[in-house]
């Protein structure tokens, strides 16, 4: 289905407050606060390839009624870039540090893609601090993954073969441009791709390679049945990176989850067609 919405530049809202939280390992996490509503909504970062700027559409829309907190993940934006400490539990600890720095006891969490892994850890191990969970394109691995290809050098890297440590070191801009083209498959997405590519080019491939070596993809899956808060899953049915069958399987594992499909949407419809996703988030958060 062709998406007709006009492509929009990602806005850059001005935070009402900002500061640094200190995580349990001493890493400083840059946070930004918007709005003054009673309900607090915190955006948990997705992958360290981008920073908090990518959720500008949601911040601008939701801050009219809620208090919205975003933060740059470790290794990106204004946050520290330690040499190690990029696994999902550490990212969950970073989120809790941001809540503590803002003196927030309860919040609704919004995330996307890989961010579901850290968000599920928070929602189960610190359930008293999470009243709702919304996830766009929840990416977690339902079966054990064989990531040996990531570490094997090759003569040439094409297509998804670019998802490789040696390819990243050899041509990081080439991988970033290819990857964002797979994320935003909707027609007329050139402006969005250019904007997000410009953000991702500030990422350091060595940090992301370190993260790939540290991640345990088996942590979040057994926790899904323990998520007790109301949960909204949003997924584009044209996502080129994540089969819809995987998302439906995740929805069945989470007790209080409901799934909303974005016809024609790619991997990040919250960025590419925010008017469609923002309405779903607002309705869910207002309930």
Image: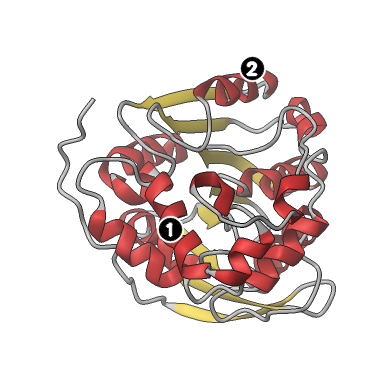
User: Which mark, residue 252?
Assistant: 2
Tell me the quarter of the picture where residue 190 sits. Answer: bottom left
Alpha carbons under labels 1 and 2: distance apart? 32 Å
- Residue that label 1 marks: 37
Is residue 88 in sight in this rendering? Answer: yes
User: Between 63 and 251, which is closer to the camera in this rendering?
Assistant: 251
Residue 286 sits above or below residue 92 on the image: above
Query: Residue 134: percent from the left, percent from the top?
Result: 53, 39
Left or right, residue 231 beside residue 259: right
In front: label 1 or label 2? 2
Tell me the quarter of the picture where residue 262 sits. Answer: top left
Query: Residue 194: percent from the left, percent from the top?
Result: 31, 64
User: Which mark, residue 54?
Assistant: none
- Residue at 36% over, 42% down: 269
Left or right, residue 140 beside residue 270: right
- Residue at 19% over, 52% down: 7
Residue 94 sits above or below residue 151 on the image: below
User: Between 67 and 12, which is closer to the camera in this rendering?
Assistant: 12
Which quadrant does the C terminus fall into? top left
- Residue at 21% over, 56% down: 8
Disc 2 on helix, strand or loop? helix
Disc 1 on helix, strand or loop? loop
């Amino acid at each position: 289905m062709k998406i007709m919405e006009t492509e929009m530049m990602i806005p850059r809202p001005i935070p009402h407050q900002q500061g640094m939280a200190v995580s349990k390992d001493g890493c400083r996490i840059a946070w930004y606060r918007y709005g003054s509503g009673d309900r607090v909504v915190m955006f948990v970062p997705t992958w360290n390839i981008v920073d908090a700027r990518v959720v500008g559409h949601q911040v601008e829309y939701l801050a009219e009624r809620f208090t919205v907190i975003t933060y740059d993940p470790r290794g990106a934006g204004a946050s520290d870039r330690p040499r190690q400490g990029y696994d999902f539990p550490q990212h969950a600890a970073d989120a809790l540090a941001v809540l503590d720095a803002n003196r927030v006891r309860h919040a609704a969490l919004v995330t996307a893609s890989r961010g579901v892994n850290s968000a599920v850890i928070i929602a189960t191990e610190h359930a008293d601090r999470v009243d709702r969970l919304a996830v766009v394109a929840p990416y977690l691995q339902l079966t054990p993954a064989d990531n040996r290809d990531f570490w094997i050098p090759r003569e040439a890297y094409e297509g998804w073969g670019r998802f490789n440590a040696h390819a990243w070191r050899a041509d990081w801009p080439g991988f970033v441009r290819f990857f964002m083209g797979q994320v935003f498959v909707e027609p007329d997405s050139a402006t969005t791709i250019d904007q997000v590519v410009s953000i991702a080019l500030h990422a350091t491939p060595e940090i992301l390679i370190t993260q790939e070596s540290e991640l345990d993809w088996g942590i979040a899956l057994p926790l899904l049945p323990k998520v007790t808060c109301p949960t909204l899953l949003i997924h584009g049915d044209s996502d080129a990176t994540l089969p819809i069958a995987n998302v439906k399987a995740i929805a069945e594992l989470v007790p209080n989850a409901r799934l909303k499909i974005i016809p024609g949407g790619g991997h990040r419809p919250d960025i590419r067609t925010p008017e469609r996703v923002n309405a779903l988030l607002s309705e869910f958060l207002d309930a």
